[in-house]
């Protein structure tokens, strides 16, 4: 359960939140820096059980074409290692002109099992070509293809979709959905705007926008245990907190602890 929760939050909420933080005209925003770094801590109750770091490089090239490179590292800490270890690396390459994913790769460790994956997106044939080394199998080589749909994103690349969307011109209860490719399937993923609140963050009262993550195929997460997201309501709109309830385990929480190698102050 803790492994699924950790990857679920790191993969789905970090990137959707970070897309929204990119939607700004402030002089200290992501738009004005070649590389932006955001570090998070994953908590279960009072215990820190994992950490994650997101970096966004907007000055990369892929085979001669300008692109965005998004990298994520997630790991378990302390009690998290006892529950089940994570040591995950993800990289996604996004075409600057079309804002579509070109290539991604990941190296995932669950306990003693390692999963390596390389994914290419072919928009001429509208096919996703996936190659995998699954080291827990006697023959680790695996491969498959997935049919692309129009405007399909990969998980890390979802931030480009939201980056160019006027989210905060929407009304409370409005939502935005997109199609995201993950492993062997395409999934519907979205965000619903829930209004503005004052929250306690880093021992300060901070204005924040509240969002709900939408996963139409998962009724439990949608109704019984929604994933709630708060982003700062200043011009930067940085993701601050992510929370959800876990069966038998209590409240899981992701907190922003470092922004560009400094304390996140709002």
Image (tube, rainbow, N blue to C red):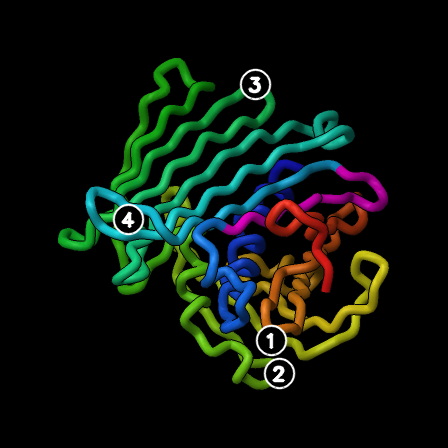
| Mark whose residue sits in front, 3 or 1 | 1
Q: Identify the disc placed on residue 112.
A: 3
Tag 3: Cα neighbours inside 10 Å, few (<14), some, or many (≥20)? Answer: few
Mark 4 vs mark 3, CA separation in Å: 30 Å
Query: Helix, strand or loop at disc 3?
Result: loop
Q: Is residue 135 left or right of residue 255?
A: left
Query: Helix, strand or loop at disc 4?
Result: strand
Identify the residue shown where x is 22% and y is 50%: 65
Tag 4: Cα neighbours inside 10 Å, few (<14), some, or many (≥20)? Answer: many
Mark 2 vs mark 3, CA separation in Å: 45 Å
Count of marks, rendered view: 4
Residue 239, position as x, y percentages in the image: 63, 60
Q: Nearer the viewer, residue 226 or 90?
A: 90
Q: Is residue 145 left or right of residue 48?
A: left
Q: Earlier in the sequence, mark 2 or mark 4?
A: 4
**104 to 207, vertically: above or below:** above
Q: Quadrant of residue 81?
A: top right
Q: Is residue 158 left or right of residue 97?
A: right
State which region is magenta: 36-48
Mark 1 vs mark 2, CA separation in Å: 5 Å
Q: Identify the disc placed on residue 38.
A: none
Residue 77, position as x, y percentages in the image: 71, 31
Q: Label 2: which residue?
A: 172
**Magenta stretch contains residue 45:** yes
| Mark whose residue sits in front, 4 or 3 | 4
Q: Label 4: which residue?
A: 102
Q: Earlier in the sequence, mark 4 or mark 1?
A: 4
Identify the residue shown where x is 57% and y is 73%: 192
State which quarter of the image contains the N terminus. Answer: top right
Mark 2 vs mark 4, CA separation in Å: 34 Å
């Amino acid at each position: 359960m803790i492994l699924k929760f950790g990857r679920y939050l790191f993969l789905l909420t970090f990137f959707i939140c970070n897309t929204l933080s990119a939607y700004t005209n402030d002089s200290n925003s992501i738009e004005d820096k070649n590389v932006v770094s955001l570090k998070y801590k994953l908590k279960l109750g009072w215990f820190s059980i994992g950490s994650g770091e997101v970096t966004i490089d907007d000055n990369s090239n892929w085979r001669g074409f300008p692109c965005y490179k998004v990298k994520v590292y997630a790991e378990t800490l302390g009690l998290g290692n006892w529950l089940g270890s994570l040591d995950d690396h993800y990289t996604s390459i996004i075409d600057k002109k079309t804002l579509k994913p070109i290539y991604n790769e990941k190296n995932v460790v669950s306990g003693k099992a390692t999963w390596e994956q390389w994914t290419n997106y072919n928009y001429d044939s509208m096919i996703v070509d996936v190659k995998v080394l699954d080291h827990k199998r006697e023959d680790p080589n695996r491969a498959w293809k997935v049919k692309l749909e129009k405007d399909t994103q990969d998980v890390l690349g979802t931030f480009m979709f939201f980056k160019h969307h006027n989210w905060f011109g929407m009304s409370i209860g409005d939502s935005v959905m997109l199609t995201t490719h993950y492993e062997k399937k395409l999934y519907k993923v979205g965000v619903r705007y829930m209004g503005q609140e004052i929250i306690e963050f880093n021992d300060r009262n901070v204005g924040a926008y509240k969002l709900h993550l939408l996963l139409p195929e998962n009724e439990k997460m949608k109704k019984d245990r929604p994933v709630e997201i708060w982003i700062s309501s200043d011009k930067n709109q940085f993701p601050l907190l992510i929370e959800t309830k876990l069966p038998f385990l209590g409240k899981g929480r992701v907190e922003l602890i470092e922004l560009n190698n400094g304390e996140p102050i709002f």
